[in-house]
């Protein structure tokens, strides 16, 4: 069969595993009112329709901060903020309700589009709204009465799940209701976090202001551990108070059990799909798992790596390495550590002349297997190889060929080995070579 090089076919094949992974999952997505103001919601609605069509259960939480500000300005009503929290008094509450209601209606209209010659053609989305959020007063803090500003007390997750199971997209506004009949103005971040926890969502996604989360030199922060959030906030003075609230809401969700939180630039067309359906993503992944903090190995890690590899060496799965050999090659290794234990490792040897890299000694601690950690470790090594300009990755294996084949590696003749590696090949082990294009 002639090799298929069509980029569309290649992309679909890369896309398919994520479709299976996400089908039936629950995503909570939150966007600010700015998404409607700048016109980016039209493309976002198309992406929402695609996710829904792939069998993903969606809860969309919207904000309305700019719309509320505009309404208050028109009516010449002052709005005070204390520590980034809006104080909602009796005069402001009608504007809050009016602005939030208008945003909700506009979103419903966008999700109802079905014009021919558009990506929404022929799509019929059912949107469900309701009093899913029970709230209480924010209270009097340091002498400041926040009046009609509130916080989430609980989520009616049974009612939400019923709408999702019926095939609807749940649309939730940043308003909460009390058994007394009072209405409270909430932050979208607090609502989204509470819903994600109440539903046990698979993902919590924030669409944020451009350019997203970046380093001081403008590079996208692709991954972040939840316990690194406060350091990021303290070292990034340019963060707005609203963005700080969003980051803390995401970290709190991770700490409470949401495994994946994403922050995505709302103005980047298609960024939501890239983040969810490509290896490299397009935003920032905030994870609750310290495993994601892959780091280069240090000399102090030698004993831990040896302990991890020893059982595999006895089974002949990996090549034996002495303490001295491993110590000499320690800078080729990468490890993942959890509570002072090396739980995973892999070695990476680049061959720059041939633009190919070798993955070796991939191992995961027995207590942490069968949870996708090996695949995630492989993905991080692939990212490292790409960042160094390599176009292929190879492994030599005697017993784990099927695992690698399931992840895109294909058999290759030993003649494909880099020149320097050919002189080191152990014919007694008779390892098979597998290559993956990056």
Image: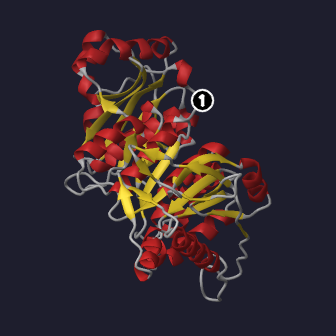
**Residue 286 location, quadrant:** top left
Number of marks:
1
Q: Is residue 141 above or below residue 3?
A: above
Residue drawn at 71 percent across, 81 percent down: 122
Closer-to-camera residue (316/255): 255
Compared across the picture, whether 153 is left or right of 83 comes to: right
Instruction: Indicate whether 293 appears above or below 234.
Output: above
Q: Residue furthest bottom?
A: 116
Q: Residue at x 36, y 51 (%)?
A: 244
Residue drawn at x 44%, y 75% as measured from the top left: 72
* Whole-percent x, y for residue 189 in the image: 49, 54
Please state, as top left, top right, bottom left or bottom right, where the N terminus lies in the image.
Answer: bottom right
Residue 438, position as x, y percentages in the image: 40, 51
Where 372 sits versus 101, above or below? Answer: above
Q: Badge 1 is on which residue?
A: 370
**Residue 78 lies in what quarter of the image?**
bottom left
Q: Report the coloring of the rendering.
A: secondary structure
Residue 350 drawn at (x, y percent):
27, 39
Determine crowd level at label 1: few under 14, some 14-19, many 20+ residues with C-alpha closer than 10 A.
few
Whether residue 74 is visible, yes or no, is yes
């Amino acid at each position: 069969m002639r090799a298929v090089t069509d980029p569309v076919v290649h992309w679909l094949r890369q896309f398919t595993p994520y479709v299976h992974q996400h089908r039936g999952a629950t995503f909570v997505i939150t966007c600010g009112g700015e998404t409607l103001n700048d016109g980016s919601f039209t493309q976002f609605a198309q992406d929402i329709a695609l996710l829904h069509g792939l069998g993903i259960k969606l809860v969309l939480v919207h904000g309305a901060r700019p719309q509320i500000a505009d309404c208050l300005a028109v009516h010449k009503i002052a709005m005070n903020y204390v520590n980034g929290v809006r104080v909602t008094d009796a005069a402001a509450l009608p504007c809050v309700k009016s602005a939030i209601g208008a945003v909700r209606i506009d979103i419903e209209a966008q999700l109802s589009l079905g014009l021919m010659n558009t990506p929404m053609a022929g799509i019929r989305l059912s949107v469900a709204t309701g009093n899913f959020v029970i709230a209480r007063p924010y209270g009097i803090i340091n002498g400041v009465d926040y009046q009609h500003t509130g916080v989430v007390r609980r989520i009616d997750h049974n009612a939400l799940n019923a709408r999702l199971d019926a095939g609807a997209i749940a649309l939730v506004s940043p308003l909460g209701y009390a058994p007394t009949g009072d209405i409270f103005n909430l932050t979208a971040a607090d609502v989204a976090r509470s819903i994600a926890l109440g539903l046990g969502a698979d993902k919590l996604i924030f669409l944020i202001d451009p350019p997203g989360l970046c380093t001081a030199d403008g590079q996208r922060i692709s991954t972040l551990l939840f316990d690194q959030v406060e350091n990021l906030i303290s070292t990034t003075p340019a963060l707005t108070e609203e963005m700080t609230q969003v980051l803390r809401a995401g970290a709190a969700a991770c700490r409470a059990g949401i495994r994946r939180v994403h922050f995505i630039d709302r103005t980047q067309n298609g960024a939501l799909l890239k983040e969810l359906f490509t290896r490299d993503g397009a935003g920032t992944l905030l994870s609750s798992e310290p495993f994601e903090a892959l780091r280069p190995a240090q000399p102090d890690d030698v004993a831990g790596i040896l302990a991890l590899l020893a059982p595999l060496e006895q089974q002949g799965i990996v090549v034996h390495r002495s303490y001295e050999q491993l110590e000499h090659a320690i800078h080729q290794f990468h490890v993942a550590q959890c509570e002072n234990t090396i739980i995973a490792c892999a070695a990476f040897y680049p061959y720059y002349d041939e633009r190919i890299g070798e993955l070796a000694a991939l191992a995961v601690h027995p207590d942490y297997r069968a949870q996708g950690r090996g695949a995630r470790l492989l993905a991080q090594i692939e990212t490292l190889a790409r960042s160094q300009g390599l176009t292929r990755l190879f492994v030599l294996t005697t017993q784990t060929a099927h695992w690698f084949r399931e992840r895109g590696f294909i058999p290759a003749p030993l003649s494909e080995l880099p020149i320097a590696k050919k002189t080191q090949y152990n014919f007694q082990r008779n390892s098979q070579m597998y290559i993956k294009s990056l």
